[in-house]
Amino acid sequence: MSLKRFCSRIAEASLSTAAAVSPGSKSKNREMAIDIFNKASRDEIARHSVPLHLIPKKRDYDELMEAIGSARVVLIGEASHGTHEFYRERALITKRLIEEKDFTCIAVEGDFPDTFTVNRYVQQLNKQTNAPKSAREALEEYNRFPLWMWRNYVMLNFVEWLRHHNDRVGKSGGDKEKSVLCGLDVYSLHRSADAVIEYLERVDPKAAKAARDQYECFEKFGDDTTMYAFAARYNLTSTCEKEAMNVLKALKEHTEEYLQKTKDGLEMESELFGCLMNAAVVEGAERYYRVMMDADATSWNVRDSCMVAALERLMHWKTEVLGRPAKVVVWAHNSHLGDARFTEMGRRRKEHNIGQLCREKWGDNNVYNIGFSTYNGEVTCASDWGQKRIEKKTVNNAMDGSYEKFFHEVAMEHNIHNFLTIFKKISDDKKPKKAATGAHPFPKLPDNKDFKSVPITSFPLERAIGVIYRPETERYSHFFEAYLSEQFDAVIHIVKLSTLLALDDKARKPGLEEENLPELFPFGL
């Protein structure tokens, strides 16, 4: 196997967000100590579930808005990277948080420089840079596989809505009230380095030259970051750790100086913020690629730690701009947002994630965590990492022993095909409480047992489809054990999925919903 192919396999394992499990835990050999597959459990969940219309003109999620209460950080997941319903419902919930609960930040599992270009469009930051002239043009910045993850019709509609929302609030409350869109991920090492130099060339040419000299350390590895990962892992050359840190340190030392040079208000402040974020991405990416080829959980943990650090920087900056505590919505895969401590990820593989770190950093009373679930349908995906062809695959019926199969039984037995189950509510006085619905805990633990004393293999399974979907090996590649009501604060179950339509998909045409933006214009829900 070539080095490049070997490295791409490593990257695929890290990026697909599919949960690998040990062969010994295969479903048919699994004795599940915690049984949820009984009529009493189905009746209990049905009694405390809220049916969803999934029709834009109908008003869903009133109960969810109440449960979120005064939380400052709302995490909204997805059980696949290629499902229309997950993306659409997440956008609808986010719009309500923006309009009803003063959320002004949307942070996504995407690269920062690409997302910041989209942000220039939604905030109309076009005096200092050539901002995109349309949402579609802005989304063309997402040019790394998988293209459909952010270059899709749901994202197109949401970006256009956010632009119009910002127009409206900007006129009444000023530019500071405009919502910001931000990427959290670490995969843009070279593009972020270029963005740092580009900004410095406008405000401090001497510093731009110094940054260019530092970042030249990466040039000997070319554009293929896996070559850097390989060289760092096997000590084939010195790393670029010090150089990446030097640029970030110098920028922080000159932040006040650069701020004093700004005379264009929010735009120049945003550009300085973007430069600092890009420098932090380079530093985080260097750390990530340096450990990417290790066989343990280190690279996953570095990546999610970097994303939470970026989230913290975003909230701090927006708080300074607003003059009041900023609130943020995070969009990422379930595997990043569901608290890893209550899953196989944390218990067996010693991985942490965004959901866990957010709860630890801001507290349960400030973080609300929403997951998605499904039984079957179709998904936009790939079979191998980096492939050009966008695939549409049938999602297998949820397997026995899984939460998805249980929710399907609830849906069929009680005729509530799509529903919301709330496990936790946060009151407006910031005191978290378990939902009055009685759906917590789920599943119920054995008598006189706490979570840590129950083997993780005793818990039901949960499905995670990332960029890659391999239905033929689904148990091994896409299912893992979890304690659902501690992993998430609420779960939305959608019985049957449809594919997320990519802007680049020439084989399929957009339907009325994708073309006409029915749920997004003019500003309503």
Image (cartoon, helix red, strand yellow):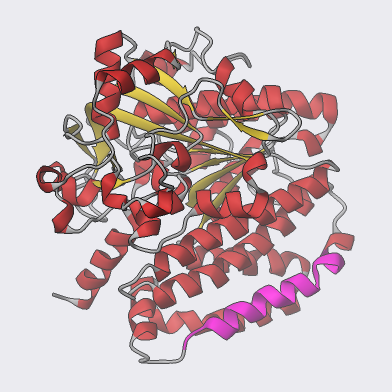
520 above or below 478?
above
| Quadrant position of residue 262 | bottom right
Comparing 209 with 415, the one in front is: 415
Q: Residue furthest front?
A: 448
Q: Quadrant of residue 39?
A: top left
Q: Which residues are magenta?
A: 239-258
Judge left or right: residue 217 versus residue 387: right
Residue 26, x across and y down, in percent: 14, 49
Q: Quadrant of residue 307?
A: bottom right
Which residue is painted at 24% across and 23% down in the image?
A: 38
The count of marks equals 0
Q: In the depicted view, which residue is nearer to us: 72 or 147?
A: 72
Q: Looking at this view, is 134 or 308 the one in front?
A: 308
Q: Is residue 232 magenta?
A: no
Residue 431: give x, y in percent of width and height. Answer: 70, 35
Quadrant of the drawing holding the C terminus? top right
Q: Main secondary structure of the magenta part?
A: helix
Instruction: Please tell me whether residue 254 belongs to the stretch shown in magenta.
Output: yes
Asked if one can make out residue 18 in the rendered structure from this viewpoint, the answer is no
Query: Can residue 210 be seen here?
Result: yes
Q: Position of residue 521 (x, y in %)?
A: 57, 15
Nearest the camera: 496 or 224? Answer: 496
Quadrant in the picture for the N terminus: bottom left
**Which residue is located at x 38 percent, y 53 percent?**
453
Q: Position of residue 450 (x, y in %)?
A: 44, 47
Question: In the image, 369: left or right of 409?
Answer: right
Above/below status of 80 relative to 188 = above
Q: Residue at x 42, y 10 (%)?
A: 53
